[in-house]
Amino acid sequence: MMRDTTLELERWLQAGGKTAGQICITRASEGWELRHTEDAQREDLTTFSKYEDARALANLDDAGAFRPLKTAPNLRHGWRLVLPDAHAVCLALDYFYPAMVGVWLAHRDGEVTPVDLHDTLARQTGMYRITQKLTDEQAQRLIARQCRSNGGCLKTILWRIRENISVPLLPPEKFRADATPAGALPLLCQEACNFVVAAARKMVKDETPLAL
Amino acid sequence: MLTKSDSALVIAGHGSTLNPDSSGPTWALAEEIRRRGVFGEVHCAFWKEEPSLRQILHCVDRAHVYVVPNFISEGYFTKTVIPRELDLGDGVTRIGRHVVKYCEPVGNHPRMTELLLKRAAEIAPGVPPEKTSLFIVGHGTDLNENSAVAAKREVDRIAALGRYREVLSGYMEEAPLISEWDKLSTSPNVVVVPFFISDGLHSYEDIPVLLGIATESPGAASANRTSVFAKNPYHLRGRTLYYASSIGTEAGFAEVILDQVAAFDARHPA
């Protein structure tokens, strides 16, 4: 049977779902309102009313810099987005936190197979092929730096470096999907993203002079 | 009119970790096609941005999914990266609960010729084509081995129409180099149209520097974002030069995407 993402999100909202990353979602007089969690008490916010506005709101941080990684904890402040229904909320969340609703539902339904970092790097070609030289120790430092929730990325990591290789520099809950607080939409990472792969390339090149 | 309400569309783009405008044309296309209600759902997926090609099928409700690469040329990304990241075989691939139909990239479509001509006419209004040299600029690298082929194909098609005094290809990284535009062309007017999907570092900074209409400097791309196109025409090297923005924002791209889906169905009858 076809999945109905809008219906699933509506059920989640009605069951008490109230935050997604740095966004809080509340009932509005007609529909739903999204705003930055740190703007919950502010009354001087600029109001937007189309789900498409989410793309511009998500694209730049408070200083106007590009946010290529949308789950980085630097969502801009100062706005409220009022939307008519759960479908619009769904589309807006796809701009704020791309793929996160879909990956959450797929994970819940057992459709997500996390991919070890070394398998991700093993399939790289072109300029990223060099990342296959990344050692486990380098991977541990890399992930601790790139993926940390305070300043890196808000997602929960579902993948491993490889079997039996953990990342001791990050807290255990960073790797536990069931550690997501009640009422929060799980932001789940099934596989190291392009930013980690690009950072791995830089680390290998910087730390292995012969690899140049 | 194409109706695919039982199917999903995924437009696959390159994206960028540096340029906030790179994915804009692909998102705008998705919104335009969504507005038309042709597909049951419309998504974008990117190589360098999110949602990634690895994530996107988790976001698709419907079983049948058309993937159209929003790329100018068939090459490294359409032949290697996208199939690898999505686990695609040739043509139709069953992946979990999805049936994925991998279409031709937009740049292969015959309508590209029309869109390039439209952009060239818009940027130089009232300038007679018979006194004008038209350059189609491609990237040209080993990795994108077919980007030069795509630009050359369009040059041949436009030249065959006989409208412009001459139609030439120029590349950033291989001969004939666009930096030698004044030596390669003979007309008093020169129109330069980049054959790229989106405006970005190449069209804001790299090509203007190669043309000699901008200077190389850190941050030039952001400074040139609008001004490089607003300052037309440029008078230099004894010619009048008109520099156009990339064609990926043309409204006609939505039809091209729909045509690529229809062409896939024609090649793979149910």
Image (cartoon, rainbow, N blue to C red):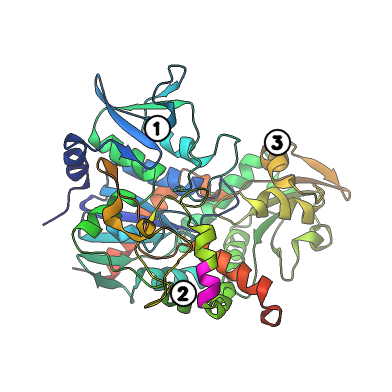
Q: Could you give the CA–CA distance between mark 2 and mark 1, rounded to whole angstroms?
A: 41 Å
Q: Could you give the CA–CA distance between mark 3 and mark 2, rounded to whole angstroms?
A: 37 Å
Q: Which residue is mark 2?
A: B80
Q: Could you give the CA–CA distance between mark 3 and mark 1, rounded to whole angstroms?
A: 40 Å
Secondary structure of the residue carrying tag 2 is helix
Q: Are marks 2 and 1 on the same chain?
A: no
Q: Earlier in the sequence, mark 3 or mark 2?
A: 2
Callout 3: residue from which chain? Answer: B
Q: Are marks 3 and 1 on the same chain?
A: no
Amino acid residing under circle 2: Thr
Callout 2: residue from which chain? Answer: B
Q: Quadrant of residue A33?
A: top left
Q: Which residue is mark 3?
A: B230
User: Which of the two residues, A29 or A140, is positioned nearer the viewer here?
Assistant: A140
Secondary structure of the residue carrying tag 1 is helix
Given the current orientation, which residue lies at the most extreme right position? B238
Residue B261 at what x, y percent from top left?
32, 59
Instruction: Mark yes or no: residue B15 visible.
Output: yes
Left or right, A4 with reference to A76: left
Amino acid residing under circle 1: Thr
10 Å crowding of disc 2: few (<14), some (14-19), many (20+)? some
User: Which of the two residues, A169 or B109, is positioned nearer the viewer here?
Assistant: A169
Q: Which mark is on residue A37?
A: 1
Q: Quadrant of residue A209?
A: bottom right
Left or right, B270 with reference to B250: left
Task: Name the residue: 45% across, 62% down.
Answer: A193
Callout 1: residue from which chain? Answer: A
10 Å crowding of disc 3: few (<14), some (14-19), many (20+)? few
Closer mark to the observer between disc 3 and disc 1: 1
Residue B125 at what x, y percent from top left?
67, 37
State whether residue B57 is above or below residue B188. Answer: below
Amino acid residing under circle 3: Ala
